Image: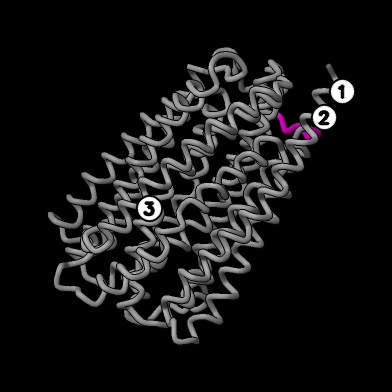
């Protein structure tokens, strides 16, 4: 069911929209964790290090597709908020053709360059076989990632975050069952984990596509509507490409850091892989809340409701501060126990390295919460250039300082320090832009009244 977010209590609307997104991503994170546990405990630490390392490479490629879907959906949400359903339908078809075409191109390019990717990111020799085996399934399944994200973000654009949740839960359950079956029963190792992911993504993509075709009656999609609108495509590009670029820059920065980590060997790679899983899990609630806020902003901006945007800002920031306090406390206190979920208890060195890393980073989670809030705010208003500036600033500091600090007495511990400094600087700059834009919106509202 669609939800018009230009009317009703802002707090209730944002939270109700956020909760299904959070639960869905919680399931997604859960099956990623199951992947990691199965590999780490039943295949081996080298396999775990390999899959953990190529997880970022996989994320980099899929972030291009997801970024395009998120950016396009922001434009759809604006059209929905303005009740312009005719152009919304045309935009959805045009955006979908574009994203699907690019998904196929990315799949072909990555499959043909697996060996080069292994070299570019300094994959240790003992992990290459596992990495290539896993990535073959991931990259060949990019078409499914394209279909699912297109459909999921169309639904979120109209305020429906529940339906993508149902399909995501189904995908997660299929993935978990097949993981256990292929690895524990048939002893297929990393091959089985990759195959399970491929099948699960395929099923969820096909089902959500069927749902969109049958249930979005108010858009009334027909085969005769399959036309590419060049005029709307230019607007979609402004939203989708810039969002995708912002997401890709962010992930590419993390990939460069992963390349630095890989130089420390398989033990440190395994510790970093475990910390990255925990870090992603910890930050996901704040990212989901911010994504819900972005849809709220886009719909209300389309309807010209500036005061409602201001109310949403206050509510969302309060929740983010509370979330970051709770998450930071849990991650810091239980760091050793969290890392030991992914590796055997006897892997003392991995646990010790990971604990020190995670405890350093977790103290500053509030900054990543503010950053993702700012990204979503700017995206909702169509100000994606600002998000790109902040991302380049954050990742530029992260990567450059990581290269420098790992050569000092800090060693591997220089990486979380570099990440924190990047967070702080981009937050300061982002707040400046935020105040400037809100000031302009307020003056415009006063002039209109």
Element type at mark 3: helix
Q: Point out residue 67 in the picture as x, y percentages from the top left corner.
A: 59, 46
Residue numbers of the magenta segment: 227-231
Q: Point out residue 112 in the picture as x, y percentages from the top left corner.
A: 52, 66
What is the secondary structure assignment of the residue under circle 1? helix
Question: Which part of the image, by quadrant, shows the C terminus?
Answer: top right
- Mark 3: give few (<14), some (14-19) or many (20+) Cα within 10 Å: many
Looking at the rendering, which quadrant does residue 401 occupy?
bottom right
Determine the CA span between mark 2 and mark 3. 38 Å
Task: Give residue 447's mark.
Answer: 1
Q: Which residue is mark 2?
A: 443
Q: Secondary structure at mark 2?
A: helix
Question: Of 84 and 219, which appears nearest the observer?
Answer: 84
Looking at the picture, does residue 428 appear above or below residue 78?
A: below
Query: Mark 3 — residue?
Result: 328
Residue 440 x/y as whole percent: 80, 35
Judge whether 434 appears above or below 316 on screen: below
């Amino acid at each position: 069911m669609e939800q018009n977010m230009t009317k009703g209590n802002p707090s209730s609307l944002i939270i109700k929209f956020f909760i299904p997104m959070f639960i869905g991503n919680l399931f997604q994170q859960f099956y990623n964790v199951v992947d990691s546990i199965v590999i780490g405990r039943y295949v081996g630490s080298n396999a775990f290090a390999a899959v953990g390392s190529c997880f970022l490479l996989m994320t980099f490629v899929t972030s291009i597709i997801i970024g395009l879907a998120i950016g396009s959906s922001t434009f759809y949400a604006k059209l929905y908020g303005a009740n312009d359903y005719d152009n919304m339908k045309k935009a959805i078809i045009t955006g979908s053709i574009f994203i699907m075409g690019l998904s196929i191109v990315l799949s072909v390019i990555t499959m043909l360059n697996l060996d080069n990717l292994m070299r570019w990111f300094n994959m240790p020799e003992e992990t290459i076989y596992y990495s290539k085996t896993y990535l073959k399934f991931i990259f060949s399944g990019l078409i499914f990632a394209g279909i699912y994200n297109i459909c999921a973000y169309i639904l979120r654009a109209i305020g429906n975050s529940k339906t993508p949740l149902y399909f995501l839960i189904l995908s997660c359950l299929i993935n978990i069952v097949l993981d256990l079956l292929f690895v524990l029963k048939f002893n297929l190792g990393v091959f089985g984990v990759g195959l399970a992911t491929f099948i699960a993504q395929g099923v969820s993509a096909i089902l959500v596509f069927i749902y969109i075709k049958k249930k979005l009656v108010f858009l009334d999609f027909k085969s005769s509507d399959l036309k590419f609108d060049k005029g709307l495509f230019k607007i979609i590009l402004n939203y989708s490409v810039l969002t995708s670029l912002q997401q890709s820059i962010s992930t590419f920065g993390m990939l460069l850091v992963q390349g630095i980590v890989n130089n420390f060997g398989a033990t440190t790679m395994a510790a970093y892989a475990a910390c990255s899983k925990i870090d992603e899990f910890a930050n996901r609630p704040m990212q989901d809340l911010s994504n819900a806020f972005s849809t709220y902003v886009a719909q209300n901006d389309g309807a010209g409701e500036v005061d409602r945007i201001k109310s949403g800002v206050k509510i969302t920031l309060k929740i983010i501060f509370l979330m970051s306090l709770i998450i930071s406390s849990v991650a810091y206190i239980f760091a050793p126990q969290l890392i030991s979920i992914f590796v055997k208890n006897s892997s003392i060195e991995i646990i010790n390295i990971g604990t020190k890393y995670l405890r350093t980073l977790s103290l500053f989670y509030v900054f990543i919460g503010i950053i993702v809030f700012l990204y979503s705010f700017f995206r909702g208003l169509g100000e994606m250039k600002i998000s790109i500036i902040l991302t380049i600033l954050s990742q530029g500091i992260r990567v450059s300082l990581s290269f420098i600090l790992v050569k000092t007495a800090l060693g591997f511990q220089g990486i979380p320090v570099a990440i924190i400094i990047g967070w702080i600087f981009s937050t300061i700059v982002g707040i400046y832009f935020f105040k400037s834009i809100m000031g302009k919106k307020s003056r415009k509202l006063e002039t209109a009244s």
